[in-house]
């Protein structure tokens, strides 16, 4: 069966510090991978998606970047965090070899102080 | 641009009631529609997936219907329980190879079932 992991679960970082959030998927090959952000009281906003190693597409211009160094690893980064980067970050995967559904990880709660 | 709307924004019901959550979308060219549940501080749990060629899907006390031509889906929860309390999100996947599986989400319905 497929499993998706995210870490850390929670993170408190000062403004201007760097960020690295990691997501890994087990039990599937060549998945599409996605990073979403969910701000308090708001819906999910797609930040980045990837259809393969090294292939990253950005949906929203921002202070963040993403990388996919391995088939089942997706990393969200920032060089200098802003207060507005606070939120709940969710990683997800989907595969056309399966049913085309999207499956989410447990999320990372980021608070920028 | 696809837009997804969920009504109502919040719903509070006594235990045992049957209830309906509504989702509407503006572009009927969808690949599939997915209903999710989100508990506070947690990730999204997939409840039901309806492909564009399907009319409904059922899982236990949950039944989701899809009317693609009118841009509507409903999630029916039978005999609600306090454990059903959560935020329910509807998301549509646009058809076409260039969509790369991207989803457009509604804002969600916050459901509270009280004993």
Image (cartoon, coloured by chain):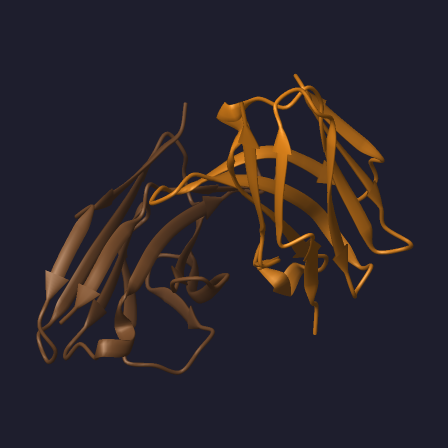
Residue B107 falls left or right of residue B64: left
**Percent x, y for residue B81?**
57, 22
Tell me the colour chain B is drawn in.
orange
> Which corner quadrant of the image does residue B9 belong to?
bottom right
Which corner quadrant holds the C terminus of chain A? bottom left
Along the line of sight, the residue nearer the viewer: B51 or B3: B3
Residue A54 location, x and y as percent? 32, 63
**Across the whole image, how many numbered discs are drawn on residues?**
0
Based on the displayed image, in which of its 4 quarters is residue A67 positioned? Answer: bottom left
Q: Quadrant of residue A30?
A: top left
Q: Chain A is drawn in which colour?
A: brown
B86 lies left or right of B2: left
Residue A91 percent location from the top left of the image: 37, 51
Measuring 15% from the left and 67% from the top, which residue is drawn there?
Answer: A19
Q: Can residue B67 be seen in this view?
A: yes
Q: In this view, does B45 lie above or below B80?
A: below
Residue at 58% x, 59% y is: B107
Is residue A101 at least partly visible in the picture? no
Residue displayed at 79% across by 64% down: B27
Q: Where is residue A57 in the image (x, y as percent from the top left)?
A: 43, 71
């Amino acid at each position: 069966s497929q499993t998706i992991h995210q870490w850390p679960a929670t993170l408190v970082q000062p403004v201007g510090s760097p960020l690295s959030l990691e997501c890994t998927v087990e039990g599937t090959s060549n998945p599409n991978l996605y990073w979403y952000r969910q701000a308090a009281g708001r819906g999910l906003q797609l930040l980045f998606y990837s259809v393969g190693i090294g292939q990253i597409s950005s949906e929203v211009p921002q202070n963040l970047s993403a990388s996919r160094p391995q088939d089942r690893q997706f990393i969200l980064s920032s060089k200098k965090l802003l207060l507005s980067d606070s939120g709940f970050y969710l990683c997800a995967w989907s595969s056309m070899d399966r049913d085309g559904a999207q499956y989410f990880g447990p999320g990372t709660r980021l608070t920028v102080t | 641009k696809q837009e997804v709307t969920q009504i109502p924004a919040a719903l509070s019901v006594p235990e045992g009631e049957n209830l309906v959550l509504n989702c509407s979308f503006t572009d009927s060219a969808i690949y599939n529609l997915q209903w999710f549940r989100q508990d506070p501080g947690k990730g999204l749990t997939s409840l039901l997936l309806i492909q564009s060629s399907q009319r409904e899907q059922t899982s236990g006390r949950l039944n989701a219907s899809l009317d693609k031509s009118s841009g509507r889906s409903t999630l029916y929860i039978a005999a609600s329980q306090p454990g059903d309390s959560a935020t329910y999100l509807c998301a549509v996947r646009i058809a076409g190879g260039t969509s790369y599986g991207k989803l457009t989400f509604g804002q969600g319905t916050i459901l509270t079932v009280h004993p």
